[in-house]
Amino acid sequence: MRYLVGVLAILVSGAVAAPLPTAAPGDLDNMQPIQGPAKGSKAGALDRLFESLREAQSPEIAWGIEQVIWSIWLRAGSDEADQLIALSIEAMNARDNALARSHLDKVVALEPAYAEGWNKRATVYYIEGDYGRSLADIRRVLELEPRHFGALSGLGLILEKSGSKEKALEAFRRALAVHPQMPAIQQRVEALSLEVEGVDL
């Protein structure tokens, strides 16, 4: 079950209230709040960050880049939606899934083109075991942001749980193509490659 914990950690990585650090895990002396780019420069900043993420040579470097990406994704685009996202994260951290979902319903209604609103709600549905609704929201996320490694990881996990192992393997590989330094997803690709294709990586 260890891989389930690892994948779920990826799904909920954005659900934090504290400033996101630039240092690697454990390097507490060097932790600094991230100052993200202005909203108008999101697309260009994300393009550069994803290029750096693909080229990262270690999990520590990738982790720092990933945190900056999450800090950008968590900005909805309007003050009201930003506040609702913050409230939904507080509710998720308190394990009040119904309240989190209520906030996120409002976010996706206010900002239907905001991918992270759909992703956060997909995560809540996943935690609640409502895989059908989670899958529907994940598909919306990927329409808006095909590089969303959290959504791709969640897609793979749901497909694997439903018995669609070939499609799960494809989803996990898509996630690694975006973010190669995800050990939990690497483990799933190795296991499913052996099971589905008979290939021992």
Image: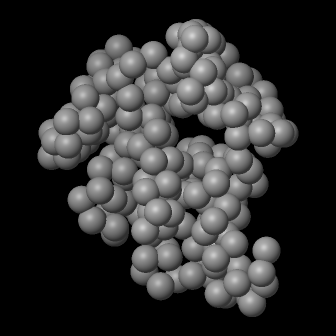
Which residue occupies the foreground of this view, 20 or 1?
Answer: 1
Q: Is residue 129 above or below residue 78?
A: below
Q: Is residue 201 above or below residue 117?
A: below
User: Residue at left 60%, top 49%?
Assistant: 149
User: Residue at left 46%, top 23%?
Assistant: 75
Which quadrant, please, contains the N terminus? bottom left
Q: Position of residue 111 (x, y in %)?
A: 39, 32
Q: Is residue 106 visible?
A: no
Which residue occupies the foreground of this view, 52 or 24?
Answer: 24
User: Residue at left 47%, top 85%?
Assistant: 163
Instruction: Please identify the quarter of the rendering in which residue 107 is found.
Output: top left
Which quadrant, please, contains the C terminus? bottom right
Q: Is residue 102 above or below residue 152?
A: above
Q: Is residue 65 visible?
A: yes
Instruction: Please identify the quarter of the rendering in which residue 167 is found.
Output: bottom right
User: Residue at left 15%, top 46%?
Assistant: 98
In the figure, is residue 4 to the left or right of 146?
A: left
Instruction: Please tell me how many numbered marks the rendered image carries.
Output: 0
